[in-house]
Image (cartoon, rainbow, N blue to C red):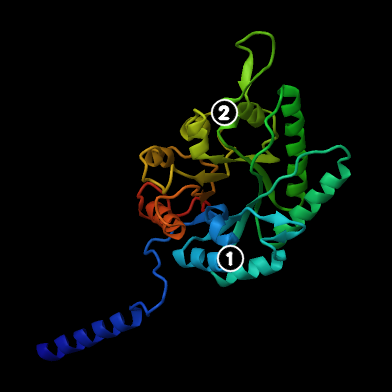
């Protein structure tokens, strides 16, 4: 009887192994898959390479087990040269979704054409299934008056996005923290470019996508900003000197242990690599998936 039970258990184990074994050529997926996305700018060279292109990048990102993408290529109603619907279909086929985009338009004399551009932009990204539209940068302001004009401009864009069921935000680099603008005659009466924007935009119309690496480069830790401006950061760009966690420059454990409760989505961006590009973005995802201090899903609140 014991011999029969042993044989039965052995056969069952063999069957399970056969059913779950990785087929040749099948992509290796992470055992822990957290709700994490990628800024496609991380793979910009592969996207522009005619032998690779956006299709292969989308497929590779899906195989790595990223869950969503943030785009950085929009022109004339098209995303990476495709209609929004075609782009969405490619993402769907790879098990991905489009969360957000980086787009920008500076105000000009005769704003009718600017608002027409934004109307088309918002409609295109909504059709692709996105939730957020993010302006990735802006010209450095000459003075507070010019910056105030931009704050008003952002509020108006935010109104348009809200009306379409989307949200509008701004993404920082280091200059926003390094540039100090005078508010009056006294030397102490001044404010950083970033602080002024957060304090002078309507929180119901404008959120901030905090790039945690660039804010630290500019002298402000993400954890300090979370405390100073709670509720303003829906999205985070998770970035390091190269692959996440490899440089020792960023204290990600402290960041995630003190994360703002408003944060809903994490977006990996890798601008420089020690590894080949695809290996680099996979290593960065693996770092977050394997980090006990990173929650499985920040959007599930």
Which residue is labeled 1 in the image?
Answer: 53
Q: Is residue 151 left or right of residue 287?
A: right
The image shows residue 149 at horizontal and vertical percentages of: 77, 30
- Give me the residue at 46% from left, 57% from top: 277
Identified at 82% across, 38% down, the residue is 108
Would you place residue 183 above or below residue 69 in this image? above
**Does residue 260 appear anywhere in the picture?**
no
Quadrant (top left, top right, bottom left, bottom right) of the N terminus: bottom left
Q: Nearer the viewer, mark 1 or mark 2?
A: 1
The alpha-carbon separation of the residues under discs 1 and 2 comes to 35 Å
Quarter assignment of residue 84: bottom right
In this rendering, the answer to whether 199 lies above or below 265 is above
Judge from the rendering whether residue 162 lies leftward or rightward of residue 246; answer left or right: right
| Element carrying mark 2 | helix
Where does the image place residue 251, in percent across and percent down from the top left?
39, 38
Counting every numbered tag in the picture gives 2
Can residue 261 be seen here? yes
In this view, the residue in front, 229 or 109, is: 109
Could you tell me which residue is drawn at 40 percent across and 41 percent down?
Answer: 252
Work out whether residue 127 or residue 87 is closer to the camera in this orientation and state it: 87
Question: Relative to 106, is 230 on the left or the right?
Answer: left
Does 242 appear above or below 216? below
The residue identified by callout 2 is 177
Residue 291 in the image: state x and y as whole percent: 36, 50
């Amino acid at each position: 009887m014991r011999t029969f039970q042993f044989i039965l258990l052995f056969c069952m184990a063999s069957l399970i192994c056969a059913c779950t074994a990785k087929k040749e050529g099948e992509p290796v997926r992470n055992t822990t898959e957290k709700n994490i996305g990628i800024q496609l700018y991380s793979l910009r060279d592969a996207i522009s390479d005619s032998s690779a292109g956006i299709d292969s990048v989308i497929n590779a990102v899906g195989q790595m087990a990223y869950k969503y993408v943030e785009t950085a290529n929009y022109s004339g109603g098209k995303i990476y040269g495709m209609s929004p619907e075609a782009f969405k279909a490619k993402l769907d086929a790879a098990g991905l979704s489009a969360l957000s985009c980086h787009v920008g338009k500076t105000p000009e004399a005769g704003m009718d054409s600017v608002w027409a551009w934004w109307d088309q932009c918002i409609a295109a990204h909504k059709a692709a299934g996105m939730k957020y539209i993010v302006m990735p940068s802006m010209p450095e302001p000459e003075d507070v008056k010019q910056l105030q004009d931009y704050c008003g401009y952002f509020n108006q864009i935010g109104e348009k996005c809200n009306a379409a069921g989307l949200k509008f935000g701004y993404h920082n680099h280091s200059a926003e923290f390094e540039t100090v603008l005078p508010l009056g005659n006294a030397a102490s009466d001044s404010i950083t470019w970033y602080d002024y924007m957060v304090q002078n935009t309507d929180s119901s119309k404008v959120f901030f996508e905090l790039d945690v690496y660039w804010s630290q480069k500019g002298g402000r830790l993400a954890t300090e900003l979370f405390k100073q401006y709670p509720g303003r950061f829906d999205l985070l760009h998770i970035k390091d000197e190269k692959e996440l966690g490899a440089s020792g420059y960023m204290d990600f454990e402290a960041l995630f242990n003190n994360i703002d409760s408003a944060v809903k989505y994490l977006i990996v961006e890798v601008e420089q690599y020690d590894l080949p590009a695809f290996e680099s973005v996979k290593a960065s995802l693996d770092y977050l998936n394997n980090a006990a201090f990173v929650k499985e899903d920040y959007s599930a609140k």
